[in-house]
Image (cartoon, helix red, strand yellow):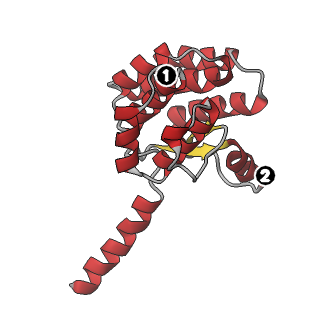
């Protein structure tokens, strides 16, 4: 009996260690470089739904001291990836709301909690051309997750199309095509 419990614990620890984006185990957060490396090594990028951020910075403890929006996003992304819940909650409560990036970060936060309506609310407030694709992709993902009947996914295809229309990068288009394959054949 003890052996079974230990086996179960050992099985559950890696699941928590590799937890996706916060509490949301349906999505995985990954840096642009790591995503490109996965593709170049032939690793599957279709079966997992990735949220691709420009960078992930593991030196996150100085997040309150910086004002550079890209750096804040990189540090917060690391906190989500590693489920640093105490730090995440502290940042969400005390972040500088005058920084536009915090609307994206709060969108990511609520997305990680599977609170999709709240995520959409913050994502729609976010206006930054550099991260527009990420914003639109996450809004489409939220709308898909909010569907009562996932087999009736055609209503969100238009949202994914809007994301495709707002990017010139082939990799971003491939991410959307992989999302659509995932939801069609799930």
Question: In which image quadrant can residue 1 be found?
Answer: bottom left
Q: CA distance from mark 1 to mark 2?
A: 28 Å
Q: Is residue 58 visible?
A: yes
**Are circles 1 and 2 on residues that touch, CB within 8 Å?**
no
Q: Residue at x 44, y 43 (%)?
A: 26
In the picture provided, is 90 more to the left or to the right than 72? left
Image point (35%, 38%), residue name: 113
Q: How many marks?
A: 2
Numbered disc 2: secondary structure: helix
Of the numbered discs in the image, which one, if any, rests on residue 40?
A: 2
- Residue at point 74% right, 34% down? 171
Q: Residue furthest left?
A: 1
Place of residue 8 in the rendered image (x, y in percent of width and height, measured from the top left): 31, 73
Q: In front here: 176 or 130?
A: 130
Classed neighbour count for the residue bearing mark 2: other residues with Cα under 10 Å, few (<14), some (14–19), many (≥20):
few
The residue where tag 1 is placed is 139
11 versus 89 height, above or below: below
Q: Position of residue 149 (x, y in %)?
A: 35, 26
Q: Is residue 46 visible?
A: no
């Amino acid at each position: 009996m003890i052996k079974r419990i230990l086996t179960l614990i050992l099985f559950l620890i890696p699941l928590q260690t590799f937890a996706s984006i916060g509490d949301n185990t349906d999505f995985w957060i990954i840096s642009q470089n790591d995503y490109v490396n996965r593709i170049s090594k032939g690793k599957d990028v279709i079966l997992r739904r990735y949220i691709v951020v420009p960078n992930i910075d593991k030196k996150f403890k100085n997040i309150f001291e910086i004002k550079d929006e890209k750096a804040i996003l990189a540090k917060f992304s690391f906190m989500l990836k590693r489920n640093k819940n105490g730090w995440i909650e502290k940042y969400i409560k005390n972040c500088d709301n005058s920084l536009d990036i915090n609307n994206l970060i709060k969108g990511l936060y609520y997305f990680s909690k599977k609170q999709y309506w709240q995520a959409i609310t913050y994502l729609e407030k976010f206006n930054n051309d550099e991260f527009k694709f990420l914003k639109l992709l996450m809004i489409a993902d939220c709308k898909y997750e909010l569907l009562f009947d996932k087999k009736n996914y055609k209503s969100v295809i238009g949202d994914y199309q809007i994301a495709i229309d707002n990017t010139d990068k082939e990799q971003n288009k491939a991410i959307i095509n992989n999302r659509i394959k995932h939801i069609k054949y799930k």
